[in-house]
Amino acid sequence: MALKARALYSFQSENKEEIDIVENEELNLLSDVSLDGWLQGTNSRGQTGLFPASYVEIVRPRSESVQVDYSRHQSSYTDTNTTTATHHGSYDDDEEDDDDWDDWDDGQSVAEEPTGSNGVPHSQPPRHNYPRPENAHRPRPQLERQDSVASGKRGSVVGRNLNRFSSFVRSGVEAFVLGDVPQFGRVGETHLIEMGSKGPQWKGSPYPFNCSVEEPTKQTKFKGIKSYISYRLTPDHTNSPVYRRYKHFDWLYNRLLHKFTVISVPHLPEKQATGRFEEDFIEKRKRRLVLWMNHMTSHPVLSQYEAFQHFLSCRDDEKQWKAGKRRAERDEMVGASFLLTLQIPSEHQDLQDVEERVDVFKAFSKKMDESVLQMSGVVSELARKHLGGFRKEFQRLGGALQGLSTSFQLDPPYGSEPLVSAISHTGQTYEKVGEMFAEQPKYDQFRLLDTLSLYQGLLSNFPDIIHLQKGAFAKVKDSQRMSDEGRMEQDEADGIRKRCRVVGFALQAEINHFHQRRLLDFKQALQNYLKEQIIFYRRVSDELEKTLHKYDSL
């Protein structure tokens, strides 16, 4: 008998894995086992996908309606359609399993984080790993709330999003725009946004620096029971090397995600459960960590983040390391509160113009994402052919020429030793060319794929960031309409508009930085690709030309 469910509330999907459901709609369930608070089923319009388990009740036989107790299920949902690995949370890796944190462990895991003063956890969970509600039978989400600013004036209300799983809500930006994020008496950090020739931009760092990632080295502990790879990091503003494992990068990455809501944090290179000590994998990870580090040090905000500076500078002092780690994990200026640290220009920007600018970038980023994905597929296929098909075909050609030279020796009176030797050498040359083709991808195609992978991650961040701005725009329009209808004080509506400007300036500054890096990165990536291709084909040409001269004296 098919499992049925009835929608208690309406839910609007945000991506292709989810489906819309309407209050009182009958749904067909694929299973009554929830996946981190989500069920999968089909709505009345034939669409199949995910929706929140707390928004439905299962219709049991014998007319029993029982709410799903999804708190008992611990399954995790994996997005099999994702083409590039993304790291928006902790991952399991054999390198890290059953491993203590050495000088990193102070008894608090990244997953068990304190809550900021704005009530938003310092964690930013993955898209399909949302925290469970406090109880299974949660009350229906409120459509309106009493605004904290105007509650004592005229009882005005401001609409809240019904979809409490929206990134606009989960990030705390909705609370910020509505004025619900508490102001701190003293903010210890400030990030400036200034007007540049192409619009708002992050103010450049007063202390720019670079950091090298070198010498991946296999190390052991517990008398060889555990093995891991460490990397030597050397910031050029200190010239003092530190050694970090991948899990240390992962810890820092999670701190970055928790803090910087409106910044596209570059993704770390993917983890690998097997073969992580193989030379090719270690080299690939190192190359991609170099790109990641270059993006971190080039960003005016991320590069100055206290936890990042601590990560790059703290050496062997365990006490000092733990103190810095605790400071990062107790940082209150995370998520929506980070927006309180931003100082924006006084120049007026029409919100309609900003919305149009964001729409243009949204269309651009979508098209670039498709192009990068296509390019990745083409280059990956070309590299595969270099490693396999081309190498094999040249080896076959070389083998055939060697066979031909051997056959010429079978009738000695008509044999020509110089010609036999030249043909044999030609066969050897083509076999060598085959090996050259197999070696070439690590000099050009792999490096181009590294850049494409980095940008797949950066581009995948922007839909959620743009959604924050779209949500803020919607609140401005709602508040202005309510003000015009006399249901909200104009001062309150002006406050919402002012806070929306902060979100808008931050997004535009991030867009500006993205374009600056994009132009530089793709220029360098394609220059390197072409240079290496020229060197490669010159080497091939040189080998063929030397072989050609073998026939000159015949």
Image (tube, rainbow, N blue to C red):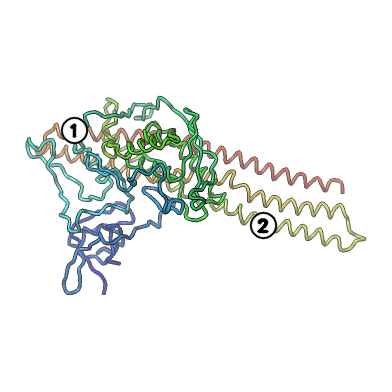
The quarter of the picture where residue 345 lies is top left
Query: Where 172 falls versus 28 (above or below)?
Result: above
Mark 2 lies on residue: 393
Query: Where 254 falls versus 94 (above or below)?
Result: above
Give residue 138's mark: none
Q: Is residue 357 visible?
A: no
Left-right relation of 428 to 488: right
Left-right relation of 360 to 380: left
Report how many numbered discs are placed on residues in the image.
Answer: 2
Mark 1 lies on residue: 495
List x then y, in percent, for residue 471: 25, 42
The quarter of the picture where residue 397 lies is bottom right
Three-letter code, disc 2: Glu
In the structure shown, which secondary structural element does the residue marked by tag 2 occupy? Answer: helix
Three-letter code, disc 1: Gly
Query: Of 148 and 367, which appears nearest the observer?
Result: 148
CA–CA distance between discs 2 and 1? 69 Å
Q: Is residue 167 visible?
A: yes
Left-right relation of 485 to 543: left
Locate the N terminus and report the quarter of the image it occupies. Answer: bottom left
Q: Residue at x 44, y 33 (%)?
A: 313
In the structure shown, which secondary structural element does the residue marked by tag 1 occupy? Answer: helix
Query: Where 198 falls versus 138 (above or below)?
Result: above
Query: Of 275 and 284, which appears nearest the observer?
Result: 275
How crowded is the residue under tag 1: few (<14 C-alpha within 10 Å), some, or many (20+)?
some
Q: Is disc 2 in contact with disc 1, using a CB cutoff of under 8 Å?
A: no
N-term-proximal mark, 2 vs 1: 2
How crowded is the residue under tag 2: few (<14 C-alpha within 10 Å), some, or many (20+)?
some
Query: Of 387 and 518, which appears nearest the observer?
Result: 387
- Seen as rendered, the residue at the extreme front is 223
List x then y, in percent, for residue 502: 27, 33
